[in-house]
Image (spheres, helix red, strand yellow):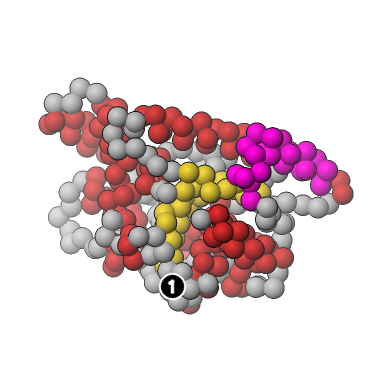
Amino acid sequence: MGYVISTANMKGGVGKTTLTVNLATCLAKSGKRVLVLDLDTQISATLSLMSPIDFAKLRKNRRTLRYLIDDIVKSSNKAKLTIEEIIQQNVSNLPRLDLLPGDIDLYDEFVVSQMLHEQAVNLGENNFETIWNRFERVLLGKILEPIRADYDFILLDCAPGYNLLTRSALATSNYYILPAKPEPLSVVGIQLLERRIAQLKESHEHEEKIDISMLGIVFTMSNNNILTGRYYKQVINRVYQDYGAQKICQTQIPVDVNVAKAVDSFMPVVLNNPQSAGSKAFLQLTQELLQKL
């Protein structure tokens, strides 16, 4: 059974999706079987690997993550598609790179709360928090169970913040990668996520232990400009002091306009422009993370 790895930060705009899809692509190019799971309602990972027209067709045919969540949250009279039928294989025309498309509307929190309340009543469970914790722990695990052994890597692209799906992603992952920009608010996002993960582990300590470790902090959008480079280094040094060199990836992802241009082609930059500085950095980072594993 392969690795399940979440990409997460409490702060948005730090390059989570760009890191996820390019890391997945580099792994697939090296011969690994890889699945990307889009957990963000902005569907950035999905639209980095397919066109909006193709996504619209999938959504119309109920072939997104939303309908797998629906199957767990509420019973449906409609014929259910399996996860194997929803996964899009060989996206960006790259063998071994698969995608479980996200959705702009993944779940209704009210419906989830209602379902869990009814479950608590039926089980005679007075502590609603116990029921909620159990649900968030197994939600994505249940969805991935039929195909988990089919992949060397399953990469979960989490939304900013700390919603139900992010908690479930962390609960079911072996590792997490923490992308961050070399700026104070992004660093605060690291600290907040670390605190949340500690709380998540604590809230589940009476059940099966959550066994997740940080694979590494990755600095993205780094800039060697004379005016900003010195300040960025000060911020990065602070993170080194707080977390130690072992937890920080040596490879930094530079600012590269080719990364943004690649999104217009609905393709990761490592495929769209493999000779660019960004592509070379993602390839080097992939080798570093594999070495860590």
* Tally of numbered tags: 1
How crowded pointer 1 is (Cα within 10 Å; few <14, some 14-19, many 20+) is rated as: many
264 relative to 240 in the view: left or right:
left
184 relative to 53 in the view: left or right:
right
Name the quarter where the N terminus is drawn: bottom left
Q: Secondary structure at mark 1?
A: loop
User: What range of the chain is rendered magenta?
Assistant: 229-249
Q: Is residue 44 visible?
A: no
**In the rendered image, which residue does mark 1 sit on?**
96
Q: Residue furthest right?
A: 226
150 relative to 230 in the view: left or right:
left
Which residue lies at the image location 67% right of the left edge and 62% below the top edge? 281
Which residue is nearer to you in this view: 112 or 281? 281
Residue 244 painted magenta? yes
Q: Position of residue 85 (x, y in %)?
A: 28, 67
Q: Position of residue 77 (x, y in %)?
A: 14, 55
137 relative to 16 in the view: left or right:
left
- Give the amino acid type for the residue marked by disc 1 in the picture: Arg
Q: Position of residue 161 (x, y in %)?
A: 50, 38
* Main SS class of the magenta portion in the image: helix
| Quarter of the view holding residue 189 | top right
Whether residue 117 is situated above or below residue 65 in the rendered picture: above
Which residue lies at the image location 34% right of the left edge and 31% below the top edge? 205
Which residue lies at the image location 38% right of the left edge and 69% below the top edge? 88
Which residue lies at the image location 32% right of the left edge and 56% below the top edge? 144
Whether residue 238 is situated above or below residue 250 in the rendered picture: above
Q: Position of residue 17 (x, y in %)?
A: 54, 55
Residue 60 painted magenta? no
Q: Is residue 226 visible?
A: yes
| Quarter of the view holding residue 232 | top right
